[in-house]
Amino acid sequence: MNTRDVVIFSGEHFVVPQCIQRIDHLSTHGWQLRYGGTKLFSDHSQDGSGARRALAMATKELLKRIATLPAPSRLRRTPSRKKQSDLPSGISGPIVRQRAGSRVRDCSFAVTLPRFGETPLARSVYIGTENTYTVERYQEALERAVALREKAEAAYQRAATKERRAQAQTLKAQMSGLLGKA
């Protein structure tokens, strides 16, 4: 998990994990956790003397949330507003094409299958030819395309959560000195 160096108003230096932000505004001084909702861990002091303890508490809460919540995903769950069809996100079509050497055109859906840490795969779900195309075949192919996309999204989410939890273990080891003081 990424960390960054933060120097607070008192001049004290901290190594802070991502998802934790420093808040110093008028009479509010503390660390705000932004993972699975927000929570402020106050310094309980105006001079910043409680900042180390507040950061330790925020980091412990971050590790707890990572261990229990699924990782945030940037996968698009709803279709773009610009999409002109009513198909779900990651599915487009029907695409009509005529292959070389064929006398009839065929129709299929294009499905984008996300993979965590890798480029997405593009798959085609066959509907039929212009001679065999029916509303029922369209619906069946759409159901297969949706199932393919949902399966890929679930695998992506599992992989993202597994990776985030592994990063949390590394973070826990990195910050063991700070976490032991809270």
Image (cartoon, rainbow, N blue to C red):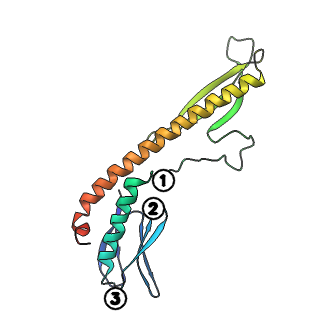
Residue 164 in the image: state x and y as whole percent.
38, 51
Is residue 125 shown above or below 28?
A: above
Is residue 72 shown above or below 101?
A: below
User: Mark 2 vs mark 1: which is more N-terminal?
Assistant: 2
Q: Which mark is residue 72?
A: 1
- Secondary structure type for disc 3: loop
- Picture residue at 48% right of the left edge, 68% below the top: 38
Q: Residue 35 carries which label?
A: 2
Q: In this orientation, which residue lies closer to the viewer: 128 or 106?
A: 128
Residue 30 visible at all: yes
- Picture residue at 30% right of the left edge, 84% below the top: 49
* Label 2 Cα neighbours within 10 Å, binned few <14 / some 14-19 / many ≥20: some
Residue 19 in the image: state x and y as whole percent.
42, 63
User: Mark 2 vs mark 3: which is more N-terminal?
Assistant: 2
Which residue is disc 3 drawn over? 47
> Is 155 on the left-hand or right-hand side of 87?
left
Residue 17 visible at all: no
For the residues labelled 2 and 3, say whether their Cβ atoms are less than 8 Å apart.
no
